[in-house]
Amino acid sequence: MAKNLIQAGDTITVPAPATVASGDLVVVGELAGVAITDAASGADVEIKTSGVWELGKTSAQAWTVGQKIYGTSAGVATTVSTDNVAIGHAVAVAANPSAKGRVRLSI
């Protein structure tokens, strides 16, 4: 086995860009994941970069299964690519309006 493996990479530690709660979408630069624990702004927080998650979304959007989803710097899932980071794909229909959507992270 290779001796230079640091970790599996599906859970990593990043500085929280704002105060986050466990389950929040966290976007740091071009990296995104879901917070495993609560953290204050600037503190280390572990994020999960894989799996299917129910995330807060832009309410005024309808999602279709397979649609590409992006994360905003404010930690909101959206279909808008401009100034946002690709985080994965919708795995369930989400109505307009609705507060949550299911996303398979594929970062």
Image: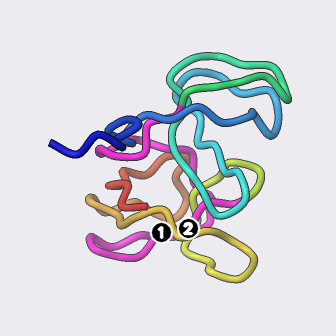
Tag 2: Cα neighbours inside 10 Å, few (<14), some, or many (≥20)? many
Q: CA distance from mark 1 to mark 2?
A: 4 Å
Residue at the image position 48 percent from the left and 68 percent from the top: 69
| In the rendered image, the vertical position of residue 7 relative to residue 65, given as above or below | above
* Quarter that holds the C terminus: bottom left
Image marks 1 and 2: residues in contact by CB distance under 8 Å: yes
Left or right: residue 36 versus residue 75 is left
| Disc 2: which residue | 70
In the rendered structure, the answer to whether residue 107 lies left or right of residue 39 reads left
Q: Residue at x 29, y 40 (%)?
A: 3
Amino acid type at image mark 2:
Tyr
Tell me: 28 left or right of 94: right
Q: Quadrant of the N terminus?
A: top left
Element on which disc 1 rests: strand
Residue 71 in the magenta stretch? The answer is: yes
Q: Nearer the viewer, residue 83 or 2?
A: 2
Q: Position of residue 55 (x, y in %)?
A: 49, 44
**Residue 58 among magenta residues:** yes
At label 1, the amino acid type is Ile
Q: Is residue 44 left or right of residue 41?
A: left
Where 107 sits versus 54, above or below? below
- Foreground of the two, 3 or 62: 3
Image x and y of residue 37, in percent:
57, 17
- Please say if 3 is above or below 93: above
Q: Residue drawn at (65%, 52%), measured in percent from left and top?
A: 76
What residue range appears in magenta?
A: 47-72
Residue indicated by mark 1: 69
- Which residue is located at x 49 percent, y 46 percent? 100
